[in-house]
Image: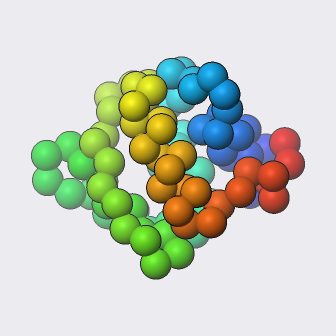
Amino acid sequence: MNHRHRKILHSLFAHPVSANIAFNDVVHTLEELGADIENKNGNRIGVSLNGHNVAFVHAQHSLPKEEVIQIKKFLETCGVDPAKYPV
């Protein structure tokens, strides 16, 4: 995982919640973590990681805070710890 992806991962887990994260950067970071990404109907993507599946709404630009929280909870469920990926 390169520096940019590690930086995005840490921003997803940052407190307070960041609202300035590009959706495409998150998708690329998820792919680097080993996730399978599938385009779905209605501006959604399906993400499969470590045996867990979820669907996210595709944001046009930056992710709203609610979606950042959803992605963070999904990553926690999958066992992803940003401490394993130092910036």
**Rendering colour mode:** rainbow
Q: Position of residue 48 (x, y in %)?
A: 42, 69
Residue 79: name its quadrant: bottom right
On screen, residue 48 above or below 23: below
Q: Is residue 12 left or right of residue 84?
A: left
In the image shown, does 79 or 38 lie closer to the viewer? 79
Is any atom of residue 8 visible in this view?
no
Task: Name the residue: 20% across, 57% down.
Answer: 40
Residue 16 horizontal side relative to residue 70, left or right:
right
What residue do we see at 71% from left, 57% from top?
81
3 with respect to 15 (left or right): right
The count of marks equals 0
The percent coordinates of residue 47 (x first, y second) are 39, 62
Q: Quadrant of residue 78?
A: bottom right
x, y percent for residue 6: 73, 46
Q: Is residue 15 above or below residue 72?
A: above
Q: Residue furthest bottom?
A: 51
Q: Is 22 on the left-hand or right-hand side of 66?
A: right
35 or 73: which is nearer to us?
73
Looking at the image, residue 25 lies above or below residue 44: above
The quarter of the picture where the C terminus appears is top right
Residue 38 drawn above or below residue 27: below
Q: Quadrant of the N terminus?
A: bottom right
Image spot of residue 77 (x, y percent): 53, 62
Q: Is residue 75 visible?
A: yes
Which residue is the extreme one toward the right? 86
